[in-house]
Image (tube, rainbow, N blue to C red):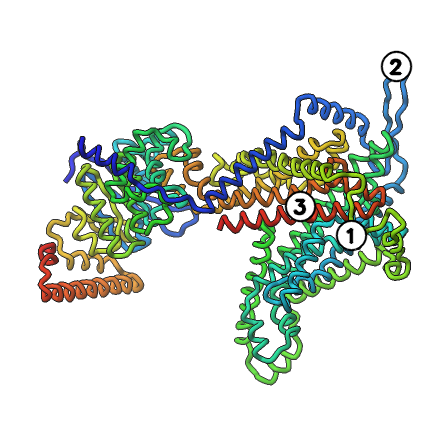
Amino acid sequence: MTALTALTARIAAIEHPRPRASTVTSYAVIIAVIGLGVWSFIGLDYSLKSLEATGRNLSRFLGMATPLQWPGWEVLGTRQADGTTTYETVWVGPEPIWAMVGTVLITLAIVIAGTALAAVLSIPVAYGAARNTTPNSVVMVICRAIGVIARATPDVVIAVFVALVWFNTGTLGGIVAIGLHSVGMISKMMADAIEQVDEGPRLAIRSVGGSKAQEFWSGVVPQALPAWIAVTLHRADINLRGTVLLGVVGVVGLGLELDLALHTGPAGMRKAIPIVLIIIAICVAFEIVSSQLRAKLLGVRPTGKGLGDTVARAVTRRSAAAAAPLSAQQQTVVDRHTAIESALHRPWTKNRVVTSLGIWLGVAIVVWAFLYADARWLALVTEGSLHLIIDPTRDRMLWPPSFGSRTWNDVLAAIVTTLQIAFAATLIGTVISAVVGPLSARNVAPNSAVRNFFRGTALVIRAIPDLVVAIIFIIATGFGPQAGALALGIGGVGLLAKLIGDSLEEVPNGPEKALSAVGGSRSQVFFASTLPMSVPALVAHLMYLLEQNVRSATLLGIVGAGGIGFLLINSLSGRHFDEVLAYLIVIIALVLVIESASMLVRRALK
Amino acid sequence: MTNSDTTVVRIEGLGKTYPGAAFSALTGVSLTVGRGEIVVLLGLSGSGKSTLLRHINGLETPTEGTVVSLGRDVSSLTGRALRELRGQTGFIFQQFEIVGPLTVLENVLTGALATLRGPRIGILTYPKSLRLKALGHLDRVGLLDRAYQRADTLSGGQQQRVAIARALMQDPEILLADEPVASLDPESSSQVMALIREIAAERGLTVICSLHQVEIALGWGDRIVGLRAGEVVLDTRTDNLTREQVMEIYGRVATSTTEITAVEVELSQAREELLSEEIQRSALERLGENRVTGEAQ
């Protein structure tokens, strides 16, 4: 008895260490996501009544949009005596099909040309923004600011701006919009890659007396080049999906076709779903090609999750692979003179042929894109009507920024709506992924059939461009934030569920084995070992999804989900550039806040 | 040496070939272990010690032969029955395999999972009686004051003691240990080995422990089973076995040159260790410290 009381006393005296910052952060993030998500659900009015209305709108849209009218066919409706309408699908010849092929090609050309432009512009920006190459801290701050502003300025805004100032310049607006906006992401990723390069070669070039520029071109570029290509291909993927939005503001291509179809009554509506299916097919095909390219050219595992990781892997693989063949070559050398002579020309090995063909094909495609898009580049210098936006007598003037007739309260309410869409979408995505993700992990799913089913589900959702689905969803179910949040939330499952599944599979499996040796059931092992060991990774993924959703929610506003994006598109269509500028500043601030929060959380998790 | 009433583990003609492997991991292994025996499995790495241990609690399924543990045919068990058997069999791993981000106490509590239904998250989801019991076990392994620390903040030796406390939580009848001290420094090693021995004596546990250090094995187990390339080549009590005998057997089982080199290295290390112990002992004696000699007797 005394022994027991002694133990009890000692138990009471055990010290409770303070929880780690990473633990506190993890749980704070999880609680915040749930709390804010619920608050947003209430705020967005997800009542039964609004859901009913959504359902009604959806069925009305489907009624109008069917039967589907594919290019090459015409659907004719005939009103019958009893008041119903019967439809007849007739072949009208191949011309509409060629027109559609042309639309697809011009879309691809704009995307490729714009992305290539961004890739080139990103090099100096990344050079200045990377800590180890920047000339000085002022340049670094400027380059990083360029990146942030480019990232936060929607390409839609740039497109409208270009269309106004350089009136009637065709595809120019789209290319410039994609080109400038994409600099944000490509330069940031490339700066990260530059900061991760091995410092040895640079040091070596410095020590043989190389200039700073030589150091960059010979010491850094070869190491960061695979990253540059990988990021550019990835960005091209994103830009292709983004063209749907650019269509809303009049950039030619599939987006514009879709927008026109949706605004020309039932006859147009019937074309809408085929166009969406074509867009999805093109996006999926493009993604497959681009990830194949990345895998072939760079040895990047296309399944890699964070782009930074992918990029880092690419750099290390490349350097490891490059080291090997050299020694083999040296061994075969016999006669010194012939060896030197033959070494004047690099031998055409199979690898070199493939790489060279790849490079030339890539260059050819980019050149084709610029030629086919046929943008009037000269107009940029000759025809600009900048006076439109710097003339103080017009209300289109850019400076000073103002909210126009809106008050700070209106703007704040719009920000809240945007955030609510993002939070609600994150909660929806998280809840669904919390089931789909673990069940798609090999070490959690009860059997391989279950695992394959859920992994497949995540893959299919991931393949479908969520923004495209969101746009269709918003239009189909009636404009409003609820529809936007729902579409974004379901779209997020593709990303989050895959990341969760991968993270759970990466957990060291020793403790799992130990707990099944203890006699724990599958679910017990999951909650006692697999889950706690992967919490930091899961929270990081959650923050990543939230970040993405804030950005997407802003864009969705442009197509009618409300929020700050809605205010932006309103001022854009009224050509009130002082308001546009004001909202842009708000959006940039919003993105900055979310990104810094995300960065702080990630740092705290380490 | 054992009669059927007290037999805890009976292995007959056990063979195991991993899919796609060129060689069998185990061939024709037969072994009977009685209640309360302390058995050491000895052999070079790759000789099949771990595979053998993992068959006893059903972590592996045999290609041929039978394993009867606690009166049950292990390979015929599935689901709840298998979990029940595992629940009565403690397993200590070389790499401890405790859940780093959880507290020490929660790690110990997971030892009781087989007796509970449904998943548990957090200490408070376990009944109070179990919590008290877990704290008692932590006290037994000398880590009570670390109960609420994250398990991955502990040293290797401490983590292995947490794993032992987790095994105690199972109220096991058999304790299997797979190279329990291979990742530990000499001082933690002797602490952990002594702890396992003490606990086995306190609870009358049957212990089967694989080791590769002859030195530790000799003074520690009641019975030594030598494995080589998946076969039992030695099975004897340690009572009157000298170190030289074991080493000779150990040396004899090594046929390939690499194995011989490995044994030679081990022998020379053992010699060095003995030598340095000798030096220390004589030095301490000179200093008048006779506690060491007292312990050695």
Q: What kind of residue is marked 1?
A: Ala
Q: Position of residue A55 (x, y in %)?
A: 72, 24
Could you tell me how far apart the alpha carbons at marks 2 and 3 are, in whole angstroms?
56 Å
Q: Where does label 3 land, which residue?
A: A590
Q: What kind of residue is marked 3?
A: Leu
Above or below: residue B184 compared with residue A480: below
Q: What kind of residue is marked 2?
A: Asp
* Of B155 and B213, the residue lying toward us: B155
Mark 2: which secondary structure?
loop
User: Disc 3 is attached to a residue of which chain?
Assistant: A
Q: Residues within 10 Å of mark 2 (few under 14, many from 20)?
A: few
Q: Is residue A149 left or right of residue B43?
A: right
Q: Is residue B167 left or right of residue A239?
A: left
Q: Where does label 1 land, which residue?
A: A177
Q: Residues within 10 Å of mark 1 (few under 14, many from 20)?
A: many
Image disc number at residue A300: none
Mark 3: which secondary structure?
helix
Above or below: residue A551 compared with residue A270: below
Give the image quarter of residue B91. Answer: top left
Above or below: residue B131 compared with residue B145: above
User: Disc 2 is attached to a residue of which chain?
Assistant: A
Note whether residue B76 is visible: no
Q: Where does label 2 land, which residue?
A: A82
Residue drawn at (28%, 52%) of the image: B181
